[in-house]
Image (cartoon, grey):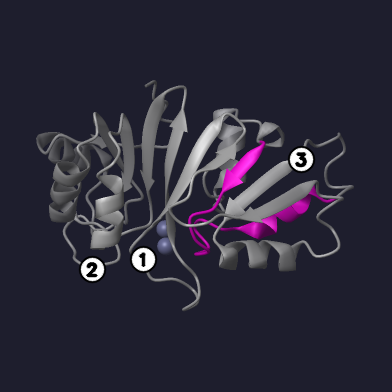
Amino acid sequence: MVDFSPDTFRKSIELGVELAKVKYLLFTHTHSDHFYLNDLKFRYPPFVKHNLQTLQIYGSEYAIKLVRKTFKGSARKCRIRSKALKLFEEHKIGRYKVIPVKAKHITNSPVETPLNYIIDVNGKTILLAFDTGLYDEGTWSFLRKFSFDLAIVEGTLCYDSWEYHMNFNDLKIFRRRVGAEEIIVTHFSHHSCPLHDKLEKILEAIGLKTAFDGLRVQI
Ligand SMILES: [Zn+2]
Ligand SMILES: [Zn+2]
């Protein structure tokens, strides 16, 4: 699982996803729409009656420091383990190969590095690009080594503009530079984005798919 928002628990019930079965959780950054530890605290007994399997949490050093602070003295009971990942290095996590790359995003602290992830599973390569604006050259040149079967990218701004999130124009540039087989756009702000039906038409015209809650993709 990548990120854990305040909607995750409710959506897991609605969509029939059993969160107790999740083994690995990667955090991109610590904004509360991605990093909502309050709900993870309910792994503490007696809120959970059955035996939980261990949840291994990964993220930047800053994110992992916050996880450890939050679960200080209770990580064992909550069956949580955590590990900081090194930027641009490959980490073996279960059957996944995971490489964190540097996102372009503002963070809660100047010492926090926002992450996006390259994930390799079953011979397929996926880029998870949220939250980020168009990358700095260092990240682009690293990404050039990969050929992506799927990219899931944020499209927060649509008609607005800000260097730390993507708008329609940024998405066109992202599509050209990443060149993935399939690109799905997610993380929309409806302050500046139209509703789903209109959004889907606009993004389809530039070769992109529009995500929605519960979307399943086979690659
Ligand atoms: Zn954010
Ligand atoms: Zn966000």
Tell me: is circle 1 under 8 Å from ligand 1. Answer: yes
Left or right of 3 in this view: 18? right
Q: Which amino acid is tagged 1?
A: His
User: At 17% across and 40% down in the image, what residue appears?
Assistant: 203
- Tell me where residue 23 sits by quadrant: top right
Left or right of 174 in this view: 149? right
Assess whether residue 83 is covered by the magenta stretch. no
Query: SS for tag 3?
Result: loop
Query: SS for tag 1?
Result: loop
Q: Check the picture and name the quadrant holding the N terminus.
A: top right
Mark 1 sits on what residue?
Answer: 105
User: At 21% across and 42% down in the image, what residue appears?
Assistant: 199
Mark 3 sits on what residue?
Answer: 54
User: At 84% across and 58% down in the image, what residue appears?
Assistant: 74
Tell me: is circle 3 under 8 Å from ligand 2. Answer: no
- Picture coordinates of residue 3 (x, y %)? 53, 49
Residue 162 is tagged as 2
User: At 49% across and 58% down in the image, what residue appears?
Assistant: 33
- Going from N to C along the chain, the mark reached first, 3 or 2, is 3
- Tell me where residue 55 sits by quadrant: top right
Q: Is residue 153 above or below residue 200?
A: below
Tell me: is circle 2 under 8 Å from ligand 1. Answer: no
